Image (tube, grey):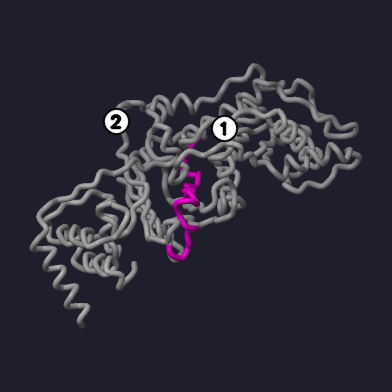
């Protein structure tokens, strides 16, 4: 009872003596490196175009032999460049830096493609083809264990087999891969600095490999990496369609591992709202904390969406910072089609990447000043931006009331927790 009276008195004092409005400017909150600027519509459309190759029917300098006597073979440089350009286009769209080709990694990847084609089976732990030298197999095994693998059947795509493989790895949303999106997350690994490609065919089946385990680059500052990224995003195939799952990979140095029992997602657009949680999801929902590139991946895909068009605001609740504070993540994706590059100078509003519950004035701590702001907002004496609203709505009922202010004050006084 004594505590209740003290809290009530403080709340009255807040109303009586608060008269100064405190505003908070939202920091740039978007996926990828904060050092990478967001792209215009025209820049995105240009990046989405495939790199042409001189002859998509003749992709080898030396054709691999997938039977005795085995021969690793060598892929033409422009075929490899097309695959690298495609990979770097995806990375740039996601706000990540380009990677380069490593001769060593290409050697691993090409031998992995050979071993996979000889076995006619995708496996990250392949068996040794009959009669293959141990040295060749060991190299191929390393490439398969440390790489992305794919195959397709039929005629060569116009841009060559490697661009097609990169598109498949970025989709990664089939029933056997959607729970983790491991291939995609390796491609969007912020510490990848180099890679290598390889391809080999067994008849009309083409098997490709990409070396994925490089961690030679130093990652710039980032909060999260998402696909689709925040900002403008083209909704044409193959970059992103309704078949693709969404994912958010949280920076482990800034976030604790998300708990699927406590995380919820709200996706808002002009077409409606989709919600995702463990107990109820308007589509697919999962969390993977396995080490594919960046740990801590939140994966979701709405059902019954015919197309993506316009702005989609994603709000993730139930997260915790690395220090254990409750926090919310919010960002916006603005979809357009490649034939619409109008309003190119209109910037997507940059919403805050993270919101710490209770810290309304963003001073890094929860104090009576935050409770005072919440109470003023409840009394219609203060108008909050979206970031402040998310921080103040501590009981998550989509409104700010005296109950929120009371809770914040109790937490600031160390007599309660969120």
Outermost bottom residue = 1
Q: Position of residue 248 (x, y in %)?
A: 47, 48
Q: Which mark is residue 346?
A: 2
Instruction: Please tell me the numbered disc located at residue 266.
Output: none
Among the 4 quarters of the image, the one containing residue 76: top right
Q: Secondary structure at mark 1?
A: helix
Principal SS element in the magenta part?
loop
Mark 1, residue position? 87
Residue 205 x/y as whole percent: 73, 35
Residue 53: percent from left, percent from top:
62, 20
Quadrant in which the N terminus is drawn: bottom left
- Residue 49 left/right relative to 199: left
Q: Is residue 381 left or right of residue 415?
A: left
Quadrant holding the C terminus? bottom left
* Residue at the far left in the pictured view: 16
Mark 2 or mark 1: name the one nearer the start of the chain. Answer: 1
Residue displayed at 81% across by 30% down: 72
Q: Residue at x 47, y 44 (%)?
A: 225
Taking depth in this image into account, of 35 and 262 the one nearest to the observer is: 35
Whether residue 303 is visible here, answered yes or no, is: no
- In this picture, is 344 found above or below 229? above
Badge 2 local density, few (<14 within 10 Å), some, or many (20+)? few
Label 1 crowd (10 A; few <14 / some 14-19 / many >=20): many
Q: Residue at x 81, y 41 (%)?
A: 138
Which picture quadrant has residue 359? bottom left
Range drawn in magenta:
239-262
């Amino acid at each position: 009872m004594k505590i209740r009276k003290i809290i009530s008195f403080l709340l009255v004092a807040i109303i009586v003596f608060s008269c100064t409005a405190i505003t908070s400017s939202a920091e740039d909150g978007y996926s990828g490196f904060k050092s990478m600027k967001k792209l215009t519509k025209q820049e995105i459309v240009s990046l989405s175009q495939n790199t042409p190759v001189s002859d998509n029917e003749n992709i080898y300098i030396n054709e691999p032999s997938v039977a005795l006597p085995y021969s690793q073979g060598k892929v033409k440089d422009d075929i490899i460049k097309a695959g690298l350009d495609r990979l770097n286009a995806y990375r740039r769209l996601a706000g990540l830096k380009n990677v380069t080709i490593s001769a060593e990694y290409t050697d691993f990847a090409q031998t992995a493609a050979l071993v996979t084609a000889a076995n006619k089976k995708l496996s990250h732990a392949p068996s040794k083809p009959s009669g293959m030298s141990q040295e060749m197999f060991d190299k191929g095994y390393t490439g398969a264990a440390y790489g992305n693998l794919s195959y397709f059947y039929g005629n060569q795509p116009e841009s060559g087999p490697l661009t097609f493989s990169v598109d498949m790895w970025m989709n990664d949303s089939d029933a056997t891969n959607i729970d983790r999106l491991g291939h995609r997350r390796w491609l969007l690994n912020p510490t990848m600095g180099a890679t290598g490609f390889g391809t080999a065919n067994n008849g009309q089946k083409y098997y490709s490999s990409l070396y994925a385990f490089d961690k030679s680059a130093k990652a710039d500052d980032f909060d999260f990496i998402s696909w689709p990224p925040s900002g403008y995003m083209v909704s044409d195939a193959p970059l992103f369609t309704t078949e693709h799952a969404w994912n958010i990979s949280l920076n482990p140095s800034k976030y604790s591992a998300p708990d699927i029992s406590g995380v919820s997602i709200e996706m808002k657009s002009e077409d409606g709202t989709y919600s995702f949680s463990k107990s109820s999801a308007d589509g697919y929902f999962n969390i993977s904390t396995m080490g594919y590139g960046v740990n801590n991946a939140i994966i979701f895909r709405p059902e019954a969406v015919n197309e993506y068009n316009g702005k989609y605001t994603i709000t993730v609740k139930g997260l915790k910072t690395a220090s254990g504070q409750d926090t919310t993540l919010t960002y916006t994706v603005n979809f357009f089609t490649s034939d619409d590059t109008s309003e190119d100078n209109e910037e997507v509003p940059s919403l805050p990447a993270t919101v710490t519950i209770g810290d309304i004035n963003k001073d890094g701590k929860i104090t009576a000043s935050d409770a005072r702001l919440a109470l003023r907002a409840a009394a219609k004496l203060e108008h909050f931006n979206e970031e402040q609203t998310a921080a103040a709505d501590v009981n998550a009922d989509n409104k700010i009331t005296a109950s929120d202010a009371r809770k914040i004050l109790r937490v600031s006084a160390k007599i309660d927790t969120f």
